[in-house]
Amino acid sequence: MADIFISYSRQDRARVTPLVAALEAEGWSVWWDPEISPGEEFDSLISRELDGAKTLIVVWTPKSVDSRWVRGEARDAADRGVLFPVRFDNARLPIDFRAVHTTDLDDWAEDPQSAAFRSLCKALEVKLGAPARPVAAQEKDSRVTVCVLPFANMSGDPEQEYFSDGITEDIITDLGKVSALSIVSRNMAFSFKGATGGVGEIGRQTKASHVLVGSVRKAGERVRITAQLIDATNDAQVWGERYDRDLKDIFALQDEISKAIVAALKLTLLPEEQHALEQRSTSNPEAYKLYLMARQFWLLDNERNNEIVIRICKHVVELDPDYAQAWATMALAQWNLFTHKDLPIDDVQHPARRALALGPNLADAHAAVAAAHRSAGNFVDGLAAAHRAIELDPGSYVANRMAGLCCMGMREYDEAIRYFEIAADLMESDFTAAMFVVQSYMAKNDRARAKDAAAKAMTRIEKIVAAEPGHSRAIGMGVYALSVLGRRERAVEWATRARLIDPDNSNLHYNLACAMCSLDEHDRALTILEGVAEKASQGMLSWIEADSDLDPIRSDPRFDAMTARARERLMQKVEG
């Protein structure tokens, strides 16, 4: 079956033809039939191709928006989380698709290198992986594909892993700025962390012609980085170097490595690419080192880490007040706290505004703004900010997760599922977005797909809990996953364990209430939730009032009474 199914109006065939050609030149297989309007009838051929396609691109135009067949195909794809809409002539989208991120192609001018088309391709790569380029396309496309494997931490201290991972991610980002290179995604590259397979096999799996391997040894204020660029077709070393530098030279060293790789591959940097490689978020090496640590804590996605992240980021911005990434990460951690602690909303909004002012083209800054809007219950503006973040970086985990949360807040569950699935694919260790997929299917009353999603999420959760038995967020969501799977006894066992590990964690208790709803234990759910509501912050109360997981108990008088008491308590606090 094809990678991409194109849904369009036959009247638009002339403008769809070059789009199909450009997608096929990228290396994807495309199904469309210029002789059959995709909506003439759902015969066996169209139905089979539609069901089998990995993604569907709907081409919205003033003509196609009026086609009930095109809308039907788009809705089917949205239900499966595989919809990628594009638009021409600023077409007014059908009302049920206006919350969906749509790529405008009015300015693409049939140019495969245009910003709009490249953005579409990046989004498709997140869902489909790098395309398997046919020989003809390889001859036409001169880009070299490189997979940057996670640099090994040779510091003798496992806690320094954040530094070697951060160096790797920055090199991936830097090389991604070079138009002559195609870089394997961070998530795919990190899936090979610690793998024992050969470079040739990694190259085959990632479709990379070259693989960069290396190590980092940090001792005090000195750092040693070794790097080798290997030809994946024959295991030959193309380039290699060892660098011993002071930590203060880390930024110049990263520039040097990226430029050396470009030179070894006999490529030429464009002037703007040379400039982009030399641009750094900070020039302060201590701020940089601490930011990498904060980001590692944030990615662990444990409530206990939020205050750690905030403390580190506050120190980082004292060292460098203009460090946009640190402000953005601080805002995201504050948002996590805001949902279950009594904090002023400005604790989220201020660092988000600061991040955006300093980094208007930084995806994380727009994601932070989306979090701030969501904190205020402004889901529409939150989704718009998340869309902008995805335009800047389709591979942003946090942007896709935030888009899903905003869609969930608007009860646009099909779109929420699409974004959450992308987020989960982008971060192999993620379990939160994976569990929001479960919740969204439950809200749609699609228990079969909810169970499938819960089984996948539980696999991730069990790995997290095995490595960190006190990870209360993972345990709490595990209880919910087990309840959806119908594993009542184990869900109760995990719930007991969770209360013992972290008895004062309101977010944990909230997740337990959701699990009890799933098990139809409505009285127990209400009892647990009453305890949460007694101390609920404004952020937590907003979540309680909107969460579809609580719909089974929403009509109970106890629910109305507890939320009314919480609102009154918070109002009295505001009034003095």
Image (cartoon, rainbow, N blue to C red):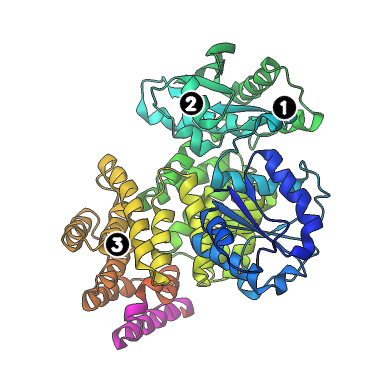
In this view, the mark in front (3 or 1): 1
Amino acid at pointer 3: Tyr
The range drawn in magenta is 551-574
Q: Earlier in the sequence, mark 3 or mark 2?
A: 2
Give whichever of 5, 191 is nearer the camera.
5
Query: Which quadrant of the structure image shows residue 244?
Result: top right
Compared with residue 391, is residue 543 higher up or lower down, i.e. above or below? below
Q: Could you tell me residue 250's position as x and y percent?
A: 59, 24
- Name which residue lies at 35% across and 86% down: 555
Amino acid on which disc 2 is placed = Ile
**In the image, which disc is placed on residue 438?**
none
Question: Which residue position holds label 1?
Answer: 139
The residue wearing badge 3 is 480
Marker disc for residue 202: 2
Q: Nearer the viewer, residue 102 or 282?
A: 102
Helix, strand or loop at disc 3? helix
Q: Amino acid at mark 1?
A: Glu
Q: Is residue 457 magenta?
A: no
- Residue at image coords 56%, 11%: 237
